[in-house]
Image (spheres, rainbow, N blue to C red):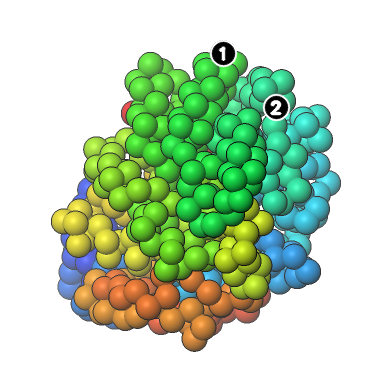
Amino acid sequence: MTAHVELAVTGGILLLPDGPRTGTLLVADGRVHAITPPHTPFDATRTIDATGLHAIPGAIDLHVHFDVPGISLEEDFHTGTRGAAAGGITFVVEHPFSDPPTTTAARYAAKRDQAANGAVVDFGLWGALTEPSLAEMEGQHALGAPGFKAFLPENDMDFPPATETDLLTGMATAARLGAKVLVHAEDPGALADGEARLRADGRTDLAALLEARPPDTEVTAVRHVLRLAQQTGCAVHLVHLSTPEAVDLVTQARRRGLDATCEVTAHHLLLDADDLPQIGGFGVCAPPLREAHHVERLWQQLQAGHIQAIVSDHCPYDRADKLAAADDVFNCPFGIQSIQEYVPLVLGEALRRGIGLEQIVPLMTSGPAHICGAAGSKGSLRPGMDADFALLDLNSPWEIDAENQQHTVERWSPYDGRSCRVRVARTVVRGRTVAIDGDIVVPRGAGRFMELSEAAAWRT
């Protein structure tokens, strides 16, 4: 008989660091107390019967944008994290594109406090690397920022793009602090030239977006960022890579000893350019959806261990603004809304491809935890870790219906009508159930802010 605990999860298959096995997960003081063999006696205040389900560590989404223009930060985080909880996500790290942009330590602190009033899952905040924030990086780091986001091209979020001088200065600061630099890497000059050329030809259709942002614009920018990271000794994380060649560059840099990691989004794994005519503005993003052969190569690189994280890059926009792509794709906001669906969809697709949970789940749990510095408490089911987990039914087909299922303000999804075999039955954060079958069962403010300043470097 173990000591008295608050919660016991019995009957399910637990995905542990050494692989899946049956057992009982015991939780005390919000942390994993022990994992015992089946039928071991226990004394618990509450018991969850997980028979027929798989318990995986709670998913960690490194790349979310919750800002909805005209909505308060508290409400943004309440809405966004409700979607996360419904989708099996227990921890998110939000990017600095709020209104106003999170470019100062004071804004970082204010965002932290407002977000905590609304969040229902735990969260962290990335800092900013852009000319207005260079002198503020150390202050943001002291408040908990494990890294700083730099955006190379012009964007629709009023976030000033980083010049080469900005990157060199910011990377040197980050290296001194032991922090990471995250980069949206697309060649800004090539993008501007491509859009101008296509507009001059009267091209503003959906296909024009793919022509204006070809794979080379990403590959060129990634090569440039890695060169600057090598020059400054800075740890660098390349966000939402969409081309296999760019992933190869990061892999090669890591083999040379550079602390370099990369992520891919669910939409670059689940959608391709042929889907764009059907889903229209709801599939407009940057980098854009790629050709099917790129998608297949990304899955191959994922299986080979060359990708460290899978993220949503969730970005809520007004439905009417997204529909504007029908008139002018270059005026359509770039971003895909998917935080609620991406975990079950990616897991279902991986299983369809014969990829086991033990290979795909770490890219949404322990891999992201290492990148953002949360690996000491989140990302795996082992004693002493936060009791963050999701219970999944791997054979419970359902159909995505954003209008009736989502917790977002604007209910739309590029995956509407798609069937998914994986269902999130329950999401638990620090031993407390936050969602059951998509329904949120905790009040706003149940989530906690986590300081992530001591970011752990990825080691290969």
Give the labeled residue for mark 2: 163
Give the labeled residue for mark 1: 231
Instruction: Name the quarter where the C terminus is drawn.
Output: top left
Image point 41% across, 18% down: which residue? Answer: 257
Among the 4 quarters of the image, the one containing residue 79: bottom right
Give the left or right position of residue 329, taking residue 459 as reference: right
Image point 83% across, 46% down: which residue? Answer: 106
Give the left or right position of residue 23, taking residue 135 as reference: left
Residue 28 image offset from top left, x and y in percent = 44, 65
Residue 424 image offset from top left, x and y in percent = 36, 74
* Mark 1 or mark 2: whose residue is earlier in sequence: 2
Disc 1: CA contacts within 10 A as few (<14), some (14-19) or many (>=20): few
Q: Is residue 434 visible?
A: no
In this view, 59 is above or below 201: below
The three-letter amino acid code for the residue at tag 2 is Thr
Q: CA distance from mark 1 to mark 2?
A: 16 Å
In this view, 240 is above or below 61: above
Q: Nearer the viewer, residue 362 or 209?
A: 209
Give the left or right position of residue 245, taking residue 355 as reference: right
Among the 4 quarters of the image, the one containing residue 160: top right
Image point 56% across, 73% down: which residue? Answer: 82
